[in-house]
Image (spheres, rainbow, N blue to C red):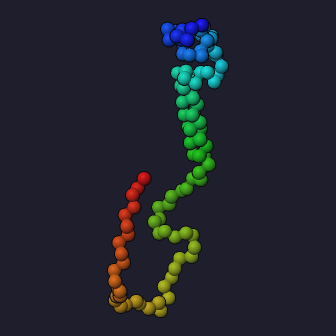
Amino acid sequence: MPAWAHASSASPPGAPDTPTAPTRLPAAAIGNLYSWRATFWLIALLGVGAAIVLWFLIPKTTTTDDDTGSTGGTEYKSKGDEGTISGTVAYAGPAPEAPVPRAKF
């Protein structure tokens, strides 16, 4: 075969002259549109399933009408001898330095 024979061929150098038959293996179907759709819906259904599982696993809380903020302990009763706090707040020393802004990524 002459050295210039590949220049006129449609095949790249080193490729067989006759093409091979396409394979139907799953690995060969990566670019197939139907496999991408199936993968999308599989991941979507897994996400919905995970959300449903989390919905049932997260404990339900009940709300009450009283907004006291108590946690169920005994209620505080004043004894009358607590006293009072009076005075002023003094800031001594220089003001603190402002934080250096950081870039958000």
In the rendered image, the vertical position of residue 84 relative to residue 13, given as above or below: below
Seen at 65% across and 19% down, the residue is 25
Q: Can residue 69 be seen in this view?
A: yes
In the rendered image, the vertical position of residue 48 relative to residue 17, given as above or below: below
Q: Is residue 15 left or right of residue 77?
A: right
Q: Could you tell me residue 100's position as x and y percent?
A: 37, 67
**On-image quarter of the N terminus:** top right
Q: In this view, does 19 lie to the left or right of 99?
A: right
Along the viewing direction, whichever of 54 and 92 lies nearer the viewer: 92
Q: Quadrant of residue 38?
A: top right
Q: Could you tell me residue 104's position as x and y percent?
A: 40, 56
Seen at 41% across and 90% down, the residue is 84
Along the viewing direction, whichever of 81 and 36 lies nearer the viewer: 36
Along the viewing direction, whichever of 102 and 53 lies nearer the viewer: 102
Q: Could you tell me residue 77's position as x and y percent?
A: 51, 82
Q: Quadrant of residue 46?
A: top right
Along the viewing direction, whichever of 95 and 13 lies nearer the viewer: 13
**Circle count:** 0
Seen at 57% across and 29% down, the residue is 39
Q: Can residue 10 be seen in this view?
A: no
Question: Which residue is most to the right?
Answer: 25
In the rendered image, the vertical position of residue 104 relative to residue 23, given as above or below: below
Q: Is residue 67 left or right of residue 19?
A: left
Seen at 54% across and 26% down, the residue is 36
In the rendered image, the vertical position of residue 99 relative to residue 33, given as above or below: below
